[in-house]
Image (cartoon, rainbow, N blue to C red):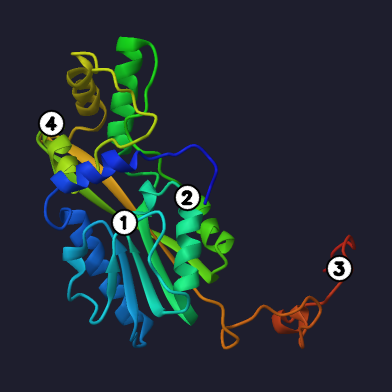
C-alpha cells in the first residue's frame, strides 16, 4: 500500500454512504447500464465476474453469479479467481488507486477483463470554480471542498502501472440541472459524494460562502431558464490480464514490408531534399 498521506477520510466516507440513497443515486444506475452495454460489445461470455462497489444492492442480479464486494482498501479477492472485474465508480475515493487496480489485476485469470469507472477532471467543474472564487473573496484563500479528480490521459496511465495489457481510457459526460446550489448539495448527499477529504477544513464555513458561490455559479454557468448545470464526467478504464493469445507488438526492425512500397513513394535517406518535379 502507498505510504503517501491519505487523501480520503474513510470513516467520514462510510458515514456519507450510509446516509445516501439506496443504490447511490442516478449516476450509479447510469454506470451500471453503461457497463452492461459495454459488455455486450465485448461479445464474449464471463462465468466468474466480480464487482467492487459502494452500493452492493444495485448490482445484485446484474451479473449472474458475481462476487460483489465493497471498495475496501484491501479487496477480498483470490488470485486468478475471476474472468471479469468491475470497479464501479469508487476509485476516485481510493487512497491508493494503483494498488486497487493491481489487486483487481491479480484477481483476474489470464485474458480476463477489468472495467474501472471513476469520476474525471471535468466533474463538477462549475461548482469547484464557484466555491473557489467565493472562498477567495471571503477568506482570501482556499480549502479542499471537492475531491481532486484526474484527467483521462493521467488515469489511463494507471492501467499500465498496474500491469494490465491493451489499456484503453475513454469517457462520457452526464449533465444534470438544478434549481439551486442547495438542491445540488442534496443530490450529492443522496449519492454519498459529499466532502470526505482527509485534509478538509473542519471550521464552520463563512455564513456568506454558499450564497456567494451560488451567485458566481449563476453568473458564470446559469441557463436562460435560471437553472444550474452540473457536469459529471465518468472515465472508463479498460484493461486485460496478460495472455499469450493477445496481440503483441512487433520487435523493432521485424517488419516484412516497406512503408514506402505501401504508399507508392520513393524512399530517401533522412535529410535528403525532395526530388525535382520540373
CA distance separating discs 3 and 1? 57 Å
Mark 3 vs mark 2: which is more N-terminal? 2
Estimate the spatial distance between the alpha carbons at disc 4 and disc 2, rounded to whole Å.
31 Å
Towards the viewer: 12 or 130: 12
Q: Which mark is residue 89?
A: 1
Q: Where residue 138 sits in the image (x, y, percent)? A: 30, 11
Q: Where's residue 229, x and y in %?
A: 20, 40
Q: How many marks?
A: 4
Residue at the spot 33% in from the left edge and 50% down from the top edge: 233
What SS does tag 3 mark? Answer: loop
Compare marks 1 and 2 and give the one earlier in the sequence: 1
Marks 3,1: beta carbons within 8 A: no
Residue depicted at x 29% and y 25%: 131
Q: In the displayed structure, does residue 8 sit left or right of residue 215?
A: right
Residue denoted by label 2 = 96
Label 1 packing within 10 angstroms: few (<14), some (14-19), many (20+): many
Image depth: mark 1 or mark 2 in front:
2
- Closer mark to the observer between disc 1 and disc 4: 1
Instruction: Give the distance between the C-alpha atoms of the residues marked 3 and 2, in whole angstroms.
Output: 56 Å
Residue hosting label 3: 275
Image position of 117 with respect to 107: above or below: above
Amino acid at each position: 500500500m502507498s505510504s503517501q498521506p491519505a487523501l480520503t477520510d474513510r470513516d467520514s466516507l462510510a458515514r456519507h454512504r450510509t446516509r445516501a440513497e439506496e443504490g447511490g443515486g442516478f449516476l450509479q444506475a447510469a454506470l451500471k447500464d453503461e457497463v452492461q452495454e459495454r459488455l455486450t460489445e465485448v461479445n464474449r461470455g464471463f462465468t466468474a465476474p466480480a464487482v467492487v462497489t459502494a452500493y452492493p444492492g444495485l448490482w445484485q442480479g446484474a451479473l449472474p453469479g458475481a462476487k460483489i464486494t465493497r471498495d475496501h482498501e484491501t479487496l477480498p479477492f483470490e488470485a486468478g479467481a475471476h474472468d471479469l472485474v468491475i470497479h464501479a465508480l469508487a476509485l476516485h475515493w481510493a487512497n491508493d488507486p494503483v494498488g486497487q487496480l493491481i489487486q483487481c489485476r491479480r484477481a483476474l485469470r489470464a485474458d480476463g477483463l477489468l472495467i474501472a469507472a471513476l469520476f474525471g477532471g471535468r466533474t463538477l467543474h462549475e461548482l469547484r470554480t464557484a466555491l473557489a472564487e467565493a472562498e477567495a473573496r471571503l477568506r482570501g484563500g482556499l480549502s479542499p471542498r471537492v475531491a481532486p479528480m484526474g484527467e483521462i490521459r493521467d488515469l489511463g496511465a494507471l492501467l499500465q502501472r498496474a500491469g494490465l495489457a491493451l489499456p484503453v481510457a475513454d469517457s462520457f459526460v452526464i449533465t444534470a440541472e438544478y434549481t439551486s446550489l442547495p438542491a445540488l448539495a442534496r443530490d450529492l448527499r443522496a449519492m454519498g459524494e459529499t466532502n470526505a477529504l482527509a485534509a478538509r477544513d473542519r471550521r464552520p464555513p463563512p455564513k456568506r460562502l454558499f450564497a456567494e458561490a451560488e451567485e458566481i455559479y449563476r453568473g458564470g454557468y446559469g441557463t436562460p431558464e435560471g437553472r444550474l448545470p452540473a457536469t459529471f464526467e465518468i472515465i472508463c478504464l479498460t484493461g486485460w490480464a496478460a495472455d499469450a493469445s493477445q496481440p503483441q507488438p512487433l520487435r523493432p526492425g521485424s517488419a516484412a514490408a516497406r512503408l514506402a512500397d505501401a504508399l507508392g513513394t520513393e524512399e530517401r535517406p533522412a535529410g535528403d531534399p525532395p526530388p525535382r518535379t520540373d
